[in-house]
Amino acid sequence: MSFLVSPGVHVREIDLTNVVPAVATSIGAIAGAFEKGPVSSVQTITSEEQLVQIFGKPQSTGNQFETFFTAANFLQYADNLKVVRAESAIVNAGANSGILIRDDDHYQSDFQDGSGSHGEWAARTAGTHGNGIGVDICSSARAFAQPLGSLNLVNGAGAVGDLSITVDDQDASNATIAVGDIISFQTASAIVATVNGAITVASKTLTVDGVSGTLAVGQRVIGAGISDGDVVVKIATVTSQTVVVLDKAITVANDIPLVFAASGGTNVESGGQEYEVSSVSGEVLTIKLLDDPAGAGLQTIIPDNSLITRRWRFSDLFDTAPGTSSWATANARGEQDEIHVAVYDTVGDITGFAVGVNGQRTQAVMEVFPNMSKNPLAKTSQGSNNYYSDVIFAQSRFIYWTDHLSAGSNWGTDIASGTDYTLVSGVDVSTLTGGTDDYSTTNGEIELAYDKLEDTESLDVNLILGGSSSITADTEANMDTHVTMITALCETRRDCVGFVSPYRAATVGVAQSIDATKNVIDGFNTCPSSSYMVFDSGYKYMYDKYSDVYRFVPLNGDTAGLCAFTDQVADSFFSPAGFTRGNVRGAVKLSYNPTKAERDQLYKARINPVTNFPGQGVVLFGDKTALSKPSAFDRINVRRLFLLLEKAIATAAKFQLFEFNDEFTRAQFRNLVEPFLRDIQGRRGISDFSVKCDGTNNTGEVIDRNEFICDIFIKPARSINFITLNFIAVRTGVSFTEVGG
């Protein structure tokens, strides 16, 4: 504070209200192989539904289902699980070839600039899950919808099923019919003409030539320049070949076919039917009634020389054809900058609907992105970024943009007024391929995935799930490698507990219980001693609703989940075992059910038995850590008590940094810690405590080293593991006080 020079009242505040904060104790974490999702990136999952949405369903290959159901089983008890998908020989499907894009950060650093020869698109997730994603780009009104000319029917007019027609007068330079296009027929009389000269907005006039008939007042103008849906554009006056148009100006280039339809005519077959093109061979088209699972042919006989109009198969999902955005017009940033993009399922693996199956077109569409801009500076009317690469990155769940169309010159550049972005005459269609799965991960790959959970400052984790102990091979040695890796992670963090199960063949399919017990004990015998680890005895048999089968799944997800459940109903310093808090959910049976004698052997070997008690369910019947020496820390509740105390008090202690090491600060810290410990004592977590933080342990030498020391003595509460009931028979006439004291 500054020095006071003249008399006055100076007010200041001193905050002595700090408390030890509450800390999380139920956050789980797991790493392993998954069907899809970000790679080598920590994702927070709150439910099994979200687990499936982001990381996919369980797979039988490489026993990947063990990892999936370990995570899913934990989520039966808790709602916060950190998941890391291990990187292995997996790649994202792409428009050209498969590439690995681990997550959004990796995309932004290595792919967002469009460098490399990756094609226009890549799947959002690595693996075969991305194969079969279709992406259509519509960049022009011509591609969006246009009249083509007259037609002749070759065969099958009016028949149910596919119909082959030959299209005459199709100008290949102006239009191309592709598989998936939607076509309709003009049943009223019409006149086809070609624009000869640009049309100005001011006069709303155009000159036509090649007129096949007489133009008349009242006729509608149908063509690529009509982009306002049902807006009717009628001829007002006719002077030779100059036409004055009412309602709107037509903005089309030269040599675009237009149709001048009779007044009251319709641009679809009678009844409103439209047809999807299923194959194209020269001028011969095969068509089916649009979105009709029966695939019926023409509903009425269409006469020769009727007009055919085609449109992009997804044009009905967009309000208007792409053109020049209002932003580009207002800022003089080029013309024809808009594109539409549709993302859809070509094979039905994602949505259950395949776009090529008649009647499934709409259901197969997963995302649409209308009126995006090719200009990297473009904004929407609300002021948000409208550059198509950025919009796709920010909003799509299924694809990344990786490059511009090779034919799209000026795309991705900021161009001046009077300059056109190149239009693609047809719709650009991409089907993503080349995505690969790899569920047979190596120990090294799994270890790298678990390493993503190592940073204690950026990531809060309390319970590490080991998942499958059989990464490369289902052997005792491989399990030891896996357990050692999990142990190293927990002891590096020193704020969490790891949970592991034995290798699969130790108990699954083992006929004799005594042999299973020996296998489990032998398997864990060489694993490190650590109070930060918990071993369980085997696997539970549960229903896999995704594959409609029953499977044996490791119990470590449930064991960790019981700790989270204990946090909900009691406190982390209570034991998660027993009939009150240790009931395992979803178990049909166990891979083996140890007897009392076998449970004794397991317990001496640091292994917590999981037992099926008839009429009482499947129960975790032990609360030991993997610490081999006798200690208070050989119990789960004590280890988790100290993790809670250490984390909470250490968090509070950060606020003492850079203060003075004097009696005021020391007293302030004691007054912070002691009420917190009294609260824990009142909740039965500790029986007694003492806090020493004074001049005896903060000596001059400590102060001169810029250190601060507080010694906190704790007597932890102990869980009951053994109950002795003495039943004593007493002779008649003998007082109980004489024998019982």
Image: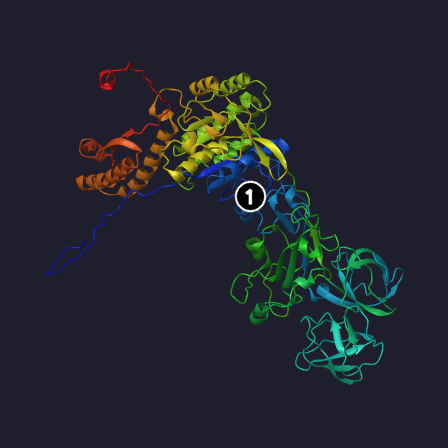
Provide the secondary structure element on which disc 1 rests.
loop
Q: Where is the C terminus found, in terms of image quarters?
A: top left
Instruction: Please state if 604 lies on the left or on the right of 313 as rendered.
Output: left
Residue 301: image location, x then y, percent = 86, 66
Which residue is found at the position 55% from the left and 65% from the top? 380
User: How many numbered markers are drawn?
Assistant: 1
The colour mode here is rainbow
Label 1 crowding class (10 Å Cα cut-off): few <14, some 14-19, many 20+?
many
Query: Quick one: 621 or 140, which is closer to the camera?
Result: 621
Residue 326: image location, x then y, percent = 58, 70
Dividing the picture into quadrants, the one containing residue 19 is: top left
Position of 652 relative to 411 (above/below) = above
Position of 65 relative to 262 (above/below) = above
Residue lying at the far right of the rendered structure: 154
- Residue matched to label 1: 38
Which residue is found at the position 23% from the left and 17% from the top? 735
Residue 97: image location, x then y, percent = 67, 44
Which residue is found at the position 75% from the left and 77% from the top? 220
Dividing the picture into quadrants, the one containing residue 321 is: bottom right
Instruction: Please state if 209 lies on the left or on the right of 123 as rendered.
Output: right
* Residue type highlighted by circle 1: Pro
Position of 568 relative to 426 (above/below) = above
Q: Is residue 555 visible?
A: yes
Residue lying at the far top of the rendered structure: 731
Residue 22: image location, x then y, percent = 34, 43
Residue lying at the far front of the rendered structure: 733
Instruction: Please state if 255 lies on the left or on the right of 652 as rendered.
Output: right
Q: Is residue 452 visible?
A: no
Query: Quick one: 213 or 349, which is closer to the camera?
Result: 349
